[in-house]
């Protein structure tokens, strides 16, 4: 058996979690119907994809 020291950083998960909460609050507060709120929550789950897409679109233009 080999003894390896493994150091895991969980700060990325914390940033994603706070971003998820913030995005969910934003999208749900903008919703006018229940189903738009559900869609807002689903958008909040994938907010990093929107962020990366817009950043790359800005960089390459």
Image (spheres, rainbow, N blue to C red):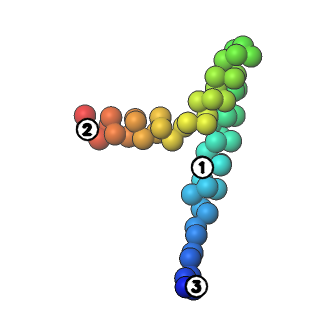
Q: Residue furthest left?
A: 61
Residue 18 lies, with reference to residue 7, above or below; the image says above
Q: Residue at x 32, y 37 (%)?
A: 58
Give SS at disc 1: helix
Q: CA distance from mark 3 to mark 1?
A: 35 Å
Tell which of 22 and 3 is nearer to you. Answer: 3
Give SS at disc 2: helix
* Residue 14 falls in image quadrant: bottom right
Residue 36 lies, with reference to residue 4, above or below; the image says above
Cβ atoms under marks 3 and 1 closer than 8 Å:
no
> Counting residues from the N terminus, which is met first, the one under dot 3 or under dot 1?
3
Q: Residue at x 38, y 40 (%)?
A: 55
Judged by depth in the image, the label closer to the viewer, 3 or 2, is: 3
Whether residue 30 can be seen here? no
Residue 9: image location, x then y, percent: 58, 67
> Counting residues from the N terminus, which is met first, the one under dot 3 or under dot 2?
3
Q: How many residues crowd mark 3 within 10 Å: few (<14), some (14–19), many (20+)?
A: few
Residue identified by numbered label 3: 1
Residue 23: image location, x then y, percent: 62, 36
Give SS at disc 3: loop
Judged by depth in the image, the label closer to the viewer, 1 or 2, is: 1
Residue identified by numbered label 2: 60
* Residue 24 falls in image quadrant: top right
Residue 11: image location, x then y, percent: 60, 62
Tell which of 29 and 45 is nearer to you. Answer: 45
């Amino acid at each position: 058996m080999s003894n390896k020291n493994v150091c895991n950083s969980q700060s990325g998960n914390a940033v994603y979690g706070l971003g998820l909460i913030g995005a969910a609050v934003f999208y749900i507060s903008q919703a006018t119907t229940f189903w738009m709120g559900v869609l807002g929550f689903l958008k909040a789950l994938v907010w990093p994809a929107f962020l990366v897409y817009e950043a790359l679109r800005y960089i390459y233009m």
